[in-house]
Structures are given as structure tokens and as C-alpha cells.
Amino acid sequence: MEAQETAELIEQSGHGGHQQNRSALTISILAMVLAIASLGGSNAMKEATQENILAANAYAFYQAKNIRQTTYKLAATDLELQLAREPNMNANAKAMFEKKIEDYKKTAERYESEPETKEGKKELMLRAKEHEATRDHAMRQDPWFDYAEGMLQIAIVLLSVSIVASVPALYWAGSVLGALGFFSTLNGYFLLF
């Protein structure tokens, strides 16, 4: 139920009653909490999605580095085997082979860890794990916001009906659900439990 509809219901039922004013004030507060819960839930899902994409990208980059590293290791091994098969290779060719083998091995080692660029396999794996941790945190938050939104919406409806029907039990039921929705919103932000 929208705030405008609630205001119209209050106007239609008359301006009197302390109970009606209390219900209207409670509805206003719960509508504000509902907006905050909705914003928190939306942000949690956006963050979870974004961090999941970043983690997947880091893992894909890690895999590409791993494939390149393996390629360089295989190339170095292949050149070493060629050297072993041709012991009578001329000195100039042998030196070129040995230099190329050394280059391949250095490149393969560099792919393992590159602290200066933070793009070695070790650094990429760390980055992916950090993105996963942030994603998991956001995914733990999201259900609490969903619970809060549902409880707050039902609470607002019950409180609105309590104004029209003048049934105190509906006010208390709406207030209890509203309080639970408020605590679910808090838990969504802070993950207290």
C-alpha cells in the first residue's frame, strides 16, 4: 500500500482518534524503514552481482596465465630435448637455444607471481578470493532485506486496516510485524545474527 493511499484512508475515516493518529505515525515510520530496507536489498544484490563478475574475471585471467605458463614450460622442455638430441650442434646455435630456454623459464616463473603489477597467478587468486568474500557477505545480507520488506509491507497493511476498522488487535499485530521488519533491516546491514 502506498503512502498516498494510506493518507486517503486516514482522511476518509475522519481526523479524530488517538488510535488513528498513533497508527498513522507508525505507518509513516514503517514506510521510511521499508524504503531503507528496499535500498539495502537492492544495493546488496548489485554488490553481489558485481563482485561475482569480478571474481569470475580474476579466475579467467588466472586460467589464462596458467595456460601461458604451461606453454612456456613446454616450449623450454622441447628446446632442452632438442639440445639433448643434437649434442654436436654448433656453438652459436647452442647458445641461442640456451638463451631461449632461459627466457622461457624466466617468463614462466614471472607468471607465477608478479607483485609489482599484481597480475601473477598468486595475486590473481588472492584477488578472486577477496571478491568472493565480498560477494558472499552481500549474499548473506540480501535475505534479511527481503524478510524485512515483506514484514514491513504486511505491517503497513495491517495498520492501515486498523485505522479503517478500528480494531486494536490489528494495530498490535502490525506493530509487532513492523518491529520484526525493523530488526531484519538492521540485521541486513550489520549481520548481527
Image: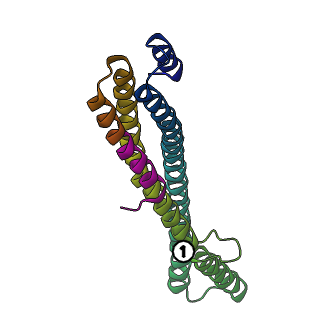
Q: In this figure, which residue is indicated by the disc labeled 1?
A: 122
Q: Residue furthest left?
A: 169
Percent coordinates x, y for residue 19 in the rendering? 40, 29
Does residue 67 lie above or below 122 as drawn? above
- Image quarter hosting the C terminus: bottom left
Percent coordinates x, y for residue 188 in the rendering? 44, 52
Q: Residue at x 53, y 49 (%)?
A: 47
Q: Which residue is drawn at 46% across and 35% down?
A: 26
Quarter holding residue 159: top left
Mark 1 surroundings: few (<14), some (14-19) or many (≥20) residues within 10 A: some
Reply yes or no: does residue 181 show up in magenta: yes
Percent coordinates x, y for residue 185 in the rendering? 44, 48
Between 12 and 45, the one lying in front of the other is: 12
Between 114 and 133, the one lying in front of the other is: 133
- Amino acid under label 1? Lys
Q: Magenta: predominant secondary structure element? A: helix
Does residue 156 lie above or below 143 as drawn? above
Does residue 145 lie above or below 93 as drawn? above
Q: How many numbered marks have been drawn onto this rendered protein structure?
A: 1
Quarter holding residue 164: top left
Per the rendered image, the range of residues in magenta is 178-193
Q: Residue furthest top?
A: 12
- Image quarter hosting the N terminus: top left
Q: Residue at x 46, y 63 (%)?
A: 133
Percent coordinates x, y for residue 75 in the rendering? 55, 72
Quarter holding residue 68: bottom right
Reply yes or no: does residue 5 show up in magenta: no
Secondary structure beneath label 1: helix
